[in-house]
Image (cartoon, grey):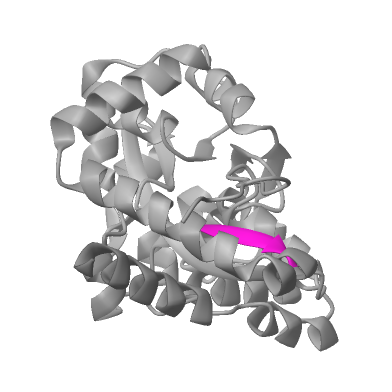
Amino acid sequence: GELDTTDLTYETNVTGGRKVLYFYGTNNTDLQETITVNGQAIYARADSDIAKAGVYSGNIIGSAETVKGCSILGPLSTAAHYNAISYVKAFDLTSDDFSMVSMEYAQAYEAFITGQGDLLATTPPYTSQLAADPNYVKVADLYDVMGAPLVDTISVQNEVAETRGDDLVALLDCLYTAMDILATDDTLRAEYGMRIYASEGTTYTEDDMASEIANQSYFTWDMLREDVYEFGATMINIGAFFVDQGMIEADDYPNIEASMDHSFIERAIAYHDAKNAE
């Protein structure tokens, strides 16, 4: 049938940690994750004492002595903020042992490469650009400190979930079909991605795009059927972090999980299979 997208908005800007702050209430429904993002990371300058301290544990670089008192650039109440505090806690330090300098991602990146701050907590495309530069060293990524990837998600207001369910299922079918195609064709994905970044005025090289493709993977229909990722794990983990930091009341924490509705993806799989069987 025809997809009616009137008043349907797919918002990708509020994701990861910042999005959790919207979900401790009960006005929204989370439908499904869309992209596994492995690019969230913290970087140091290669000549810094933190980088020179070497491997502390696993893939985490630094030491309690070199990290204590450092400044980390990045936006507050986001996955970057979560990453920064979790990184510091890996050395048995606390949030009182470093300063988080609040800047949006682009501003923080520019500040860091011009000499400000000791560390940068950031996201693609900036992690890709830093990874390609020998002057910078990745000291930790979100997977190292959380044990699970950060994922983008799809969310709608409860009223839309309740009254426009069939339209949302059709929208999910379109979205996952597109991601399935991009996930298996790196050339097409690179061409599409470069075109999008150029339209947004972002300077992005072919090497940056190759790094993004290596670090960020789209969910495919097979992945959805195999249930390779625990639905909602990212939001639940980061929600617990926000409770610990006093950003969410402990009594509101259960509302995060209550906002998740996995039935939409089950319906989308059934819709997709039935449509292709025709």
User: Where in the figure is residue 181, as x and y percent of width and height?
Assistant: 22, 45
Task: Name the image quarter holding the C terminus.
Answer: bottom left
Q: In the depicted view, which residue is nearer to us: 202 or 136?
A: 202
**Residue 35 to residue 225: above or below:** above
Residue 200 forms part of the magenta stretch: no
> Can residue 58 be seen in the rendering of this structure?
no
Viewer can see residue 60: yes
Q: Is residue 207 above or below residue 153?
A: above
Is residue 155 part of the magenta span, yes or no? yes
Counting the numbered discs, the total is: 0
Which residue is at 27% across, 45% downward?
Answer: 215
Q: Position of residue 232 (x, y in %)?
A: 51, 75
Instruction: Provide the major secondary structure of the magenta segment.
Output: strand
Image height of 201 relative to 227, above or below: above
Q: In this view of the protein, which residue sits in the foreground, 110 or 236?
A: 236
Q: Residue 159 at what x, y percent from top left? A: 79, 68
Q: At 72% across and 87% down in the image, what residue appears?
A: 254
Picture quadrant of residue 95? bottom right
Q: Quadrant of residue 256?
A: bottom right
Q: Residue 20 placed where, x, y %? A: 68, 64
Residue appearing at x 70%, y 38% in the figure? 101
Q: Residue at x 43, y 57 (%)?
A: 34
Task: Write the start and end of the magenta stretch as one range.
Answer: 153-157
